[in-house]
Amino acid sequence: MNSIDQAISRLRQIAPDPLAGRRNPHRWRVLPTTTVDVHRICRAYEVTDSAIAFAVGKLLLAGDEGRPANDDVMEAIDALTRYLEIQAEDSSSLYANVAGTPEAKVKHETGRQSHLAHGMGLL
């Protein structure tokens, strides 16, 4: 055993893998603190989409602060529904290549932009 292997072996004795032996280890994350909030949980699981993070927060705290849990669950469903709508919009030809849309072409050729393209945030 070389010195690197010895060092790794010694480290494992001192600080064993906190996930070793856990059922479904892919569902666990080691966090730098023991007190966490929803934002830290989303960061640990690499949730980067704001709609998904919002839904996670609503579900983790459903019924907290005196609100009916059903209200929070419905808000999470609404956020996830919007997430799916955005995914569909992004994959449509209108959003997939913004520079190649007819609205973008009009702006390029005339120096103007339509209210539709501007309102949709395309230009």
Image: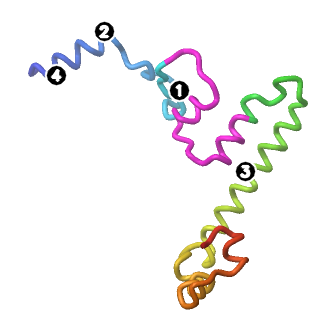
Q: Which mark is residue 80?
A: 3
Q: Earlier in the sequence, mark 1 or mark 2?
A: 2
Q: Earlier in the sequence, mark 1 or mark 4?
A: 4
Depth check, front residue: 112 or 59: 112
Q: Could you say whether the residue bearing mark 1 is in a helix, strand or loop?
A: loop
Answer with left or right where residue 47 lies relative to residue 64.
left
Q: Nearer the viewer, mark 1 or mark 3?
A: 3
- In which image quadrant can residue 70 be found? top right
Q: Vertically, is 101 above or below 1?
A: below
Q: Are marks 1 and 2 in contact (CB under 8 Å)?
A: no
Depth check, front residue: 62 or 21: 62
Q: Nearer the viewer, mark 3 or mark 2?
A: 3
In magenta, the rendered stretch is: 33-57
Which SS type dominates the magenta stretch?
A: helix
Q: Vertically, is 5 above or below 90?
A: above
Q: Which mark is residue 14?
A: 2
Looking at the picture, which amino acid does disc 3 mark?
A: Leu
- Disc 4 target residue: 5
